[in-house]
Image: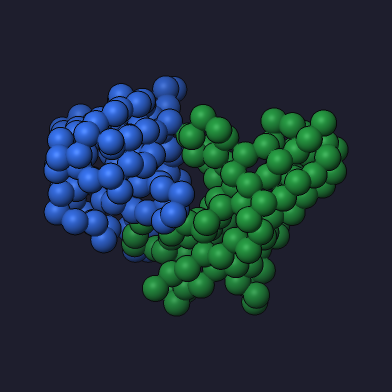
Amino acid sequence: AQKVTQAQTEISVVEKEDVTLDCVYETRDTTYYLFWYKQPPSGELVFLIRRNSFDEQNEISGRYSWNFQKSTSSFNFTITASQVVDSAVYFCALTSSGYSTLTFGKGTMLLVSP
Amino acid sequence: KAGVTQTPRYLIKTRGQQVTLSCSPISGHRSVSWYQQTPGQGLQFLFEYFSETQRNKGNFPGRFSGRQFSNSRSEMNVSTLELGDSALYLCASSLSPGTSGILQETQYFGPGTRLLVL
């Protein structure tokens, strides 16, 4: 069975601070895919980034960066210079090769205050 | 390109009634999945459709059903509504379903339908 754990229930930061959201996953599959989604108050899940298990290169996309560590089964997500518009619930999700079903963590609510 | 659309956005029903929710995927996407989101259980997979066939079903009672049409649009139906069915129902689409040995496609979500059962 797959499992995704987001230990941080809620994080509060002040605008322009950097913030890292933690995600730890469990899977027995050798090929899997990890995702981060953002859910603003409107409800829609917005795709942010993805990482394939066979590619450990960490990347930066604008203010977003991610740290994928297979050895510790972690897929952490960092927002640099946070903005008020970043306030939302962030979900880490996992699926395996051959399946479409996403297993989600419980989410981390990020509140960025001005 | 237009995103995933879901109708209606909001629904209020009473116990025992049935409801049908609709999802139109992104143009060209042929795989549609449904998820239920509640404060207690979080995001849970309901079912997945591809080529008008249900590929996977989550752990939900038979009151929850769905279908997909030849244009990839999908509907889900909940019969004999219970109070616990109150939730945000999210639809996601992708180009194709997960296939072993082939790079997984990303799922893109719609705005959801908020269902309140009284």
Q: Seen in the image, is A84 located left or right of residue B32?
A: right
User: Where B83 sits versus B21, above or below?
Assistant: below
Q: Quadrant of residue B75?
A: top left
Q: In terms of depth relative to the viewer, which is nearer, A107 or B16?
A: B16
Q: Chain A: what color?
A: green
Q: Residue A95: percent from the left, percent from the top?
A: 43, 60
At which x and y percent is residue B29?
33, 36
Report the residue at 67% width, 37% height from top: A87
The quadrant of the image that shows the C terminus of chain A is: top right
Residue A59 can be seen in this image: no
Look at the image and tell me whether residue A88 can be seen.
Answer: yes
* Colouring scheme applied when the structure was drawn: by chain
Residue B85 placement, left or right of A83: left
Give the colour of chain B: blue
Q: Residue at x 68, y 44 (%)?
A: A110
The part of the image, by quadrant, that contains residue A113 is top right
| On screen, residue B9 above or below B107 | above
Q: Residue at x 35, y 32 (%)?
A: B113
**Which residue occupies 59% across, 47% down?**
A90
Is the N terminus of chain A in the top left, top right, bottom left or bottom right quadrant? bottom left
Q: Nearer the viewer, residue A62 or B35?
A: B35
Give the image location of residue A42, x and y in percent: 51, 29
Q: For residue B82, which quarter of the picture? A: top left
